[in-house]
Image (cartoon, rainbow, N blue to C red):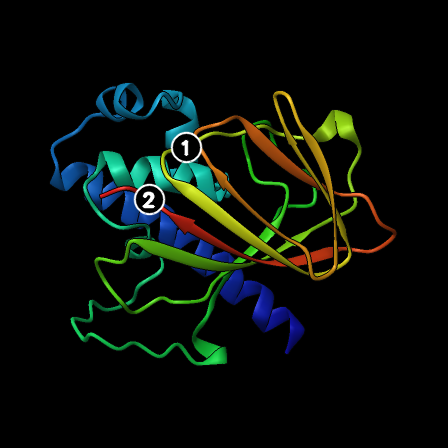
């Protein structure tokens, strides 16, 4: 059963790459065009399309914005138009970190919690952060705002001029165009609900 789950996770991660390629080609963008629109490198985008790199949330946001879709597009199997959307526990899309991630690749695990509603302005995720050294932190910035509610563990938030230690039950809300990063500083993986809002 566990092996089957791992295969399913790999397939879901690969679907992101396939959807990215299809959407890029539908927009008649070359890899160079998309790289210019997102400030991501051409090889990095190619690796995402081929399923060799698991993209972090900030990267998916940039790609979605450049391609004029909501980030939910990458997690959906079908397009829904309902005003109310329920995502059951077994319908959530989980994207795993790789054991040895590359530069620019995510170093955490995330699950998309609302996969059916299209045209959303908010994207909710369940995120797990592994224990990490300061030197391994990857700083990102993207358009919009972000809210994090720490469910378990201890998390460090860093921006260019601020460091905050968050304990279970703490929250942080910030403008995500500032360069920022999180790392787990406890003994065990930290778990949080993260809601990302992207300006229309």
Rendering coords of residue 56 (x, y %): 50, 41
Of all residues, the one furthest to the right in this rendering is 187
Front residue (pair 148, 25): 148
Image side of residue 168 versus residue 25, left or right: right
| SS at badge 1 | loop
Rendering coords of residue 145 (x, y %): 42, 42
> Which residue has dot 1 on it?
142
> Which residue has dot 2 on it?
198
| Labels 2 and 1 touching (C-beta < 8 A) | yes
Seen at 39% across and 24% down, the residue is 40
Seen at 33% across and 44% down, the residue is 198
Does label 2 or label 1 sit earlier along the sequence? 1
User: Which quarter of the figure is the N terminus placed in?
Assistant: bottom right
Rendering coords of residue 157 (x, y %): 67, 38
Label 2 packing within 10 angstroms: few (<14), some (14-19), many (20+): many
| SS at badge 2 | loop
Label 1 packing within 10 angstroms: few (<14), some (14-19), many (20+): some
User: Which quarter of the figure is the C terminus placed in?
Assistant: top left
Query: Marks 2 and 1, Cα distance to the nearest angstrom?
Result: 9 Å
Seen at 41% across and 23% down, the residue is 43
Seen at 66% across and 27% down, the residue is 162
Count the numbered circles shown: 2
User: Can see residue 95?
Assistant: no
Front residue (pair 172, 28): 172
């Amino acid at each position: 059963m566990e092996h089957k789950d791992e295969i399913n996770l790999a397939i879901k991660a690969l679907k992101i790459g396939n959807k990215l390629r299809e959407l890029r080609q539908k927009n008649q963008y070359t890899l160079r065009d998309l790289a210019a629109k997102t400030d991501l490198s051409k090889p990095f985008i190619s690796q995402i399309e081929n399923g060799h790199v698991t993209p972090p949330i900030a990267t998916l946001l940039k790609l979605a914005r450049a391609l004029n879709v909501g980030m939910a597009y990458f997690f959906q199997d079908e397009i829904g138009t309902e005003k109310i959307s329920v995502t059951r526990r077994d319908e959530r899309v989980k994207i795993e970190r790789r054991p040895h991630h590359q530069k620019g690749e995510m170093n955490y695990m995330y699950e998309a919690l609302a996969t059916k509603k299209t045209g959303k302005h908010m994207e909710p995720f369940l995120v797990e952060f592994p224990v990490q050294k300061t030197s391994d932190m990857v700083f990102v910035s993207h358009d919009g705002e972000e809210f994090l509610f720490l469910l378990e563990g201890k998390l460090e938030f860093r921006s260019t001029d601020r460091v905050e230690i968050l304990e279970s039950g703490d929250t942080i809300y910030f403008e995500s165009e500032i360069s920022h990063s999180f790392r787990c500083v406890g003994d065990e993986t930290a778990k949080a609900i993260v809601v990302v809002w992207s300006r229309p």
